[in-house]
Image: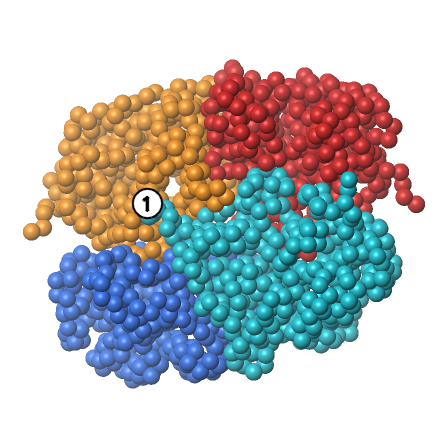
Chain colours: A cyan, B red, C blue, D orange
Amino acid sequence: MMSKPIGVGMIGYRFMGKAHSQAYHDVGFFFNLTRPVAMRAICGRDEAAVKAAAAKWRWESYETDWRNLLKRDDIDIIDIGSPGNTHKEIAIAAAEAGKHIICEKPLANNLADAKAMLAAVQKAGVKHMVAFNCRKIPAIILAKQWIDEGLIGEPYLFRGTYLQDFIIDPDFPLVWRLQKELCGSGPLGDLAAHTIDLAHYLVGDIAEVVGMMKTFISERPLPQAFDEGLGATGSASEKKGPVTVEDSAAFLAKFSNDVLGTFEATRFATGNRNAHSIEINGSKGSIKWNIERLNEIQLYLKDDPQGRQGWRTVLVGEGSHPYISAYWPAGHIIGWEHSFIHEVYEFLEAIANDTAIAPSFVDGVKCQAVLEAVEQSVKEKTWIPVEQVNG
Amino acid sequence: MMSKPIGVGMIGYRFMGKAHSQAYHDVGFFFNLTRPVAMRAICGRDEAAVKAAAAKWRWESYETDWRNLLKRDDIDIIDIGSPGNTHKEIAIAAAEAGKHIICEKPLANNLADAKAMLAAVQKAGVKHMVAFNCRKIPAIILAKQWIDEGLIGEPYLFRGTYLQDFIIDPDFPLVWRLQKELCGSGPLGDLAAHTIDLAHYLVGDIAEVVGMMKTFISERPLPQAFDEGLGATGSASEKKGPVTVEDSAAFLAKFSNDVLGTFEATRFATGNRNAHSIEINGSKGSIKWNIERLNEIQLYLKDDPQGRQGWRTVLVGEGSHPYISAYWPAGHIIGWEHSFIHEVYEFLEAIANDTAIAPSFVDGVKCQAVLEAVEQSVKEKTWIPVEQVNG
Amino acid sequence: MMSKPIGVGMIGYRFMGKAHSQAYHDVGFFFNLTRPVAMRAICGRDEAAVKAAAAKWRWESYETDWRNLLKRDDIDIIDIGSPGNTHKEIAIAAAEAGKHIICEKPLANNLADAKAMLAAVQKAGVKHMVAFNCRKIPAIILAKQWIDEGLIGEPYLFRGTYLQDFIIDPDFPLVWRLQKELCGSGPLGDLAAHTIDLAHYLVGDIAEVVGMMKTFISERPLPQAFDEGLGATGSASEKKGPVTVEDSAAFLAKFSNDVLGTFEATRFATGNRNAHSIEINGSKGSIKWNIERLNEIQLYLKDDPQGRQGWRTVLVGEGSHPYISAYWPAGHIIGWEHSFIHEVYEFLEAIANDTAIAPSFVDGVKCQAVLEAVEQSVKEKTWIPVEQVNG
Amino acid sequence: MMSKPIGVGMIGYRFMGKAHSQAYHDVGFFFNLTRPVAMRAICGRDEAAVKAAAAKWRWESYETDWRNLLKRDDIDIIDIGSPGNTHKEIAIAAAEAGKHIICEKPLANNLADAKAMLAAVQKAGVKHMVAFNCRKIPAIILAKQWIDEGLIGEPYLFRGTYLQDFIIDPDFPLVWRLQKELCGSGPLGDLAAHTIDLAHYLVGDIAEVVGMMKTFISERPLPQAFDEGLGATGSASEKKGPVTVEDSAAFLAKFSNDVLGTFEATRFATGNRNAHSIEINGSKGSIKWNIERLNEIQLYLKDDPQGRQGWRTVLVGEGSHPYISAYWPAGHIIGWEHSFIHEVYEFLEAIANDTAIAPSFVDGVKCQAVLEAVEQSVKEKTWIPVEQVNG
């Protein structure tokens, strides 16, 4: 007998809305779910658009007011994919309504909001997850396993860069991601948030930071229309408005465990379309990874026999690798979208079996604390300790 | 108003069955179909297994005799994913039943059968496609566009290798892919067929070939159980049987347009999990590609400014690249499975709009003619002309 | 008629002594010198060792006191390859003796010394060069040409890392490079100095920095013997001494022209044997380079035709590329040592023709100013402006 | 006391003449020779050119008739770098004069000549070497060690391609390398000879071959002047002459030990400036190498722990790697020219110590037997057994 489905109500229908929809649509195809998932409703303010999205992505219904999702008994999960400035209100209300919550990163536009959200879900006792999907890429889980086994020894150095270039054209329009009141920050919150979370996951807590930020192009045309899924398309109007977030950010970090880290996140690294890469150097070995080749991970082992040491490229596609047995034979690579499938798979299973889930809002708050310390360090031009968060 | 769905009945529920199922499951999520697709029935001889597959992959029903699929009015397409020795009978019957047919490669286990299948679909006037999915990878379509635009000039050389290693272990069991009466040939038909089709697509017809083949391990344990999706798993029994196909094959080819080609297909290239790669050298430029990095293609242009020529790695993920606008922003890579989504998308659209489709059974026969010439050249130890097939 | 040779007296006979010797030995083989070079004398304190070096590397004579070199009329150039703490005294005396000077990097162990050296050579009117050999690698000169032509547009970002791992073993002995009184600093002065100079050369002046440094292993065995040319060999004694330089350093930089830069230099990046790499992102394109593949440079051009943009790997081996016409046909790569050949070639020609030479002590002082600001920023935990140096 | 020098007389002063000269010039700088080398005389027919070469490359004297070299008592080694059609006469005369001989590849323009040369040196009892310099690249020697240790197990497959493109331009002039009477063959003898020798060295003897060849551009302008060192420069005259060698060649090979091999050599692979690459697949592992990155070698080991297998890139620059202790610390790469330094080092030491040397004329004859069988197979369009040569 089929167990009761877990109903999902999702807010947002653009880039992340599509990625999450596809994840719910496919998770049961590849994985055996304890309880099946039901795509109950997608929610957005533009009725025509959200209706079309519901039809295309196979949601059972749609809503134009997110509050309606909270009232529905057939909905167990609220999936928040709207801009950052909306997260707090929705998440707190959803928690109070007893809904489990998966929320896009960064968790909020500032640390206080993020903490309030965490308090709300903890008080309500619901499951909560922050959508750091990079953690769910098989190569990253494999790296975590290797590190936990001690394969690279004691970590010394972390190096993370998230390089994009989609706004390098001065005529790229002033979309919501360039407006601080909507998104909170530029590549720092949008991109470095992923890198910080990977550092937390793979290396440890960050204790102290100092950063720099810059807006290279201070005014941009107001958008007439913009399809985020397609990048910098759509003609811009002639009127301009101020860019209120940074175009580029970088910071130095000292970890609590004495690791030194460097981070950079930018939308001005021409030629780097989505180059999220990390490297970790330890006393016995090192790991390198780049999301543009997400099915590969590089491993170096100092204690390999003399003369045979080298960076080995492991094609993460073996049945023995994380999640891969759900897919294809070795060498038939999977895409970026599968990180979301794994994410919702884990969330659904955590709900069905009442087990712990990570990354949770605790991880979201921890990331936010780093982001906030970086921003403060930029303003004050000095090192700033990161507020430590207890899970 | 929604137009009438196109119903699919699929035979086979292992590796290819799963890949095709996922394609039907997802095609409408990413693409706007003229007529929606309906996954009517999946067919296999083992009722328990096929029933489970139907449930997991969301087929509306299942059958244990493929003849039943042909009788059903709600089925428009027969999708053949069973071993090669079954293709001919099923395809001819399906054509006679007026069904459109998509058939896995190689089209048949020999040229005569393939020609009979082509004659049957042509006589019946149904749509027919052979599942050379590599043709539907965006990087390959892009390569085709570049070649057609004359970007690399007149082609001189083609170099194709399809290297796997999944049977390198002598204890790997004697699965159906190692038995000539079921599969027709080893890596030649299983792997080189893909490379030959790409050569036909990108370069032209092959006129003459000479080849060599070898079976390195002549006896293998009979299998107790085998999950093809997971590769070489499952314990083998102690009894052994003869391997009746080649482990490795290679051949030289002269094309009708004077291009020289080298081909190799093997399951004994340790370290190469699924390394299907091609290179084409022309008078003005060159192209290189490897399916293990299927989102990338390398291009060299001789007429780039002096001193700046180099192999450029194009990350095929731009909205302007083939099929990519259906997916994610630049740099968010897609997986191998999307080749099947594109394949069934094109087949469904060709049916809905009554337009031409490629690769068709004509391409299947052309490929078979090359395979057969290679096999003959091995037996006779000399060059063999390839029977030319008219579309 | 052969013109009068330029006589060289060189101090130091280890790693850099060997590299410079080979450069003098080979420069005339590959290049047409206006005046030939004469390897007059090599100098070191250990007579047996320096005598052997002289014989092996074909110096005409040897000295055990560098002051003797200054007295010899047959010596025009003093080449300083001894540890950093000796540079100032030797260079000032050499300048006063009217000798041209080429000095290893970093120019001195602190800014004041470097400035005194610059004043001395300027007062004496001799030619002076600092041995930032990376600038003389063909790929780097090519990058400079491209940047000067505007190929990558206005620069936005600079990213430089110099990663080594040769002291990762805690038993690696306490060689002079780990003793501050001898070498001035650790990877900062030894490695980052190269990266800083490349940034100055390719991007512009650095205005402000903030850094961090760490010594992961604070005590090491005192060495019994050590062959620098062979890396971490030679047994260590049981007695230990304190490591007085950093093992790892990183800093953020703001350039005068608004470029943002990140720098890292470390001897603890396991798996990176000598990974000196830079990336520059500009408004129209980007450049990437790594000294471990010094014959290659990567170039991305945003304005390449739509859909064809990609990182191209230029194999710097064409007759049209800098210095390459002196060597072999395309694709026959040269080694790291050729950077020194080019360096001494340029120095010899500048002397023979009385023309300007770069990088000069001015560049050495500029680099030192950055190093000193980084060290100060680490001590004061804040941003420090870099003292600007006029050439 | 210094032992008596070994005197060298070299014939040829173009590409190979320069490479060999540099080797003699530098061998003593890096290596400790049992007997020093003396560069006695360089020989060429154009007196002005050979005189200039002698001065530039530091030969003690020059000759315009190679017979004079044989008469000189101060000359122990004859180094033959002139076109292939001259090898036989010179080598036999040199052997009769009791000179040791190092001869460029291919050993001769046909098998009969090569055998006559071998007979002559064997009869004379002189040392003989054929200049297959690829064998002397550290990465290749390392590969040989690994194979001999059984690291990759029993070999199954060999794959070798030597791809160039320097004559792709139809206006490239008709240089001696395109005239059969001078050079014997095109890329087959010029390029594949290297690959065949590597196959002999690393895998074993070739038993049987079948090949194809093609001349894509049948007429070319007669050259006015041509500098081989610079590639395709120099204006061509308007008069044309026939190209009498192939532009491209490929062949299949069956080895005596049941390995299957594919070979390709071409000057028409646009974008490949000097891409000589090999791959060997064995029962336990595989090796890949490309001369354009000659300091790297890739190794795959099947028996690495489950989930960690991958192609590792070994940077051949460790003190423990072949020849590297003569050079620089790890990660400071060497160039192509060092293969010649190693070659003459080994030859000089074999003479000084009267020890065996490889590759000898025996290897040259073995290679020639394969080349001849390939040419015959092309003419007869069938498989041809390779004449087996006893060392």
Q: Residue furthest right?
A: B1
Looking at the image, residue C60 lies above or below residue B379:
below
Q: Residue furthest left?
A: D1
- Left or right: residue D166 compared with residue A359: left
- Left or right: residue D367 compared with residue C279: left
Instruction: Report the residue at 51% width, 72% height from top.
Output: A207
Q: Nearer the viewer, residue D151 or A177?
A: D151
Q: Read off the residue under disc 1.
A: D138
Q: Quadrant of the C terminus of chain C?
A: bottom left
Q: Position of residue B276 (x, y in %)?
A: 56, 37
Chain to which mark 1 belongs: D
Q: Residue furthest top?
A: B380
Amino acid under label 1?
Pro
Instruction: Report the residue at 39% width, 62% height from top.
Output: C268
Q: In which quarter of the view is residue D184 placed?
A: top left
Q: Position of residue C194 (x, y in %)?
A: 39, 68
Instruction: Report the residue at 86% width, 53% height from top.
Output: A61
Residue C260 appears in the picture as rendered: no
Q: Position of residue C212 (x, y in %)?
A: 44, 74
Instruction: Report the residue at 72% width, 29% height from top.
Output: B48
Q: Nearer the viewer, residue A235 or C6?
A: A235
Q: Position of residue A388 (x, y in %)?
A: 56, 72
Please give the count of numbered marks on the rendered protein. Answer: 1
Residue C278 appears in the picture as rendered: yes
- Left or right: residue B201 compared with residue A5: left
Mark 1 nearby-residue class (10 Å; few <14, some 14–19, many ≥20)? many
Q: Nearer the viewer, residue A243 or D170?
A: A243
Q: In which quarter of the view is residue C97 placed?
A: bottom left
Looking at the image, residue D198 lies above or below residue C340:
above
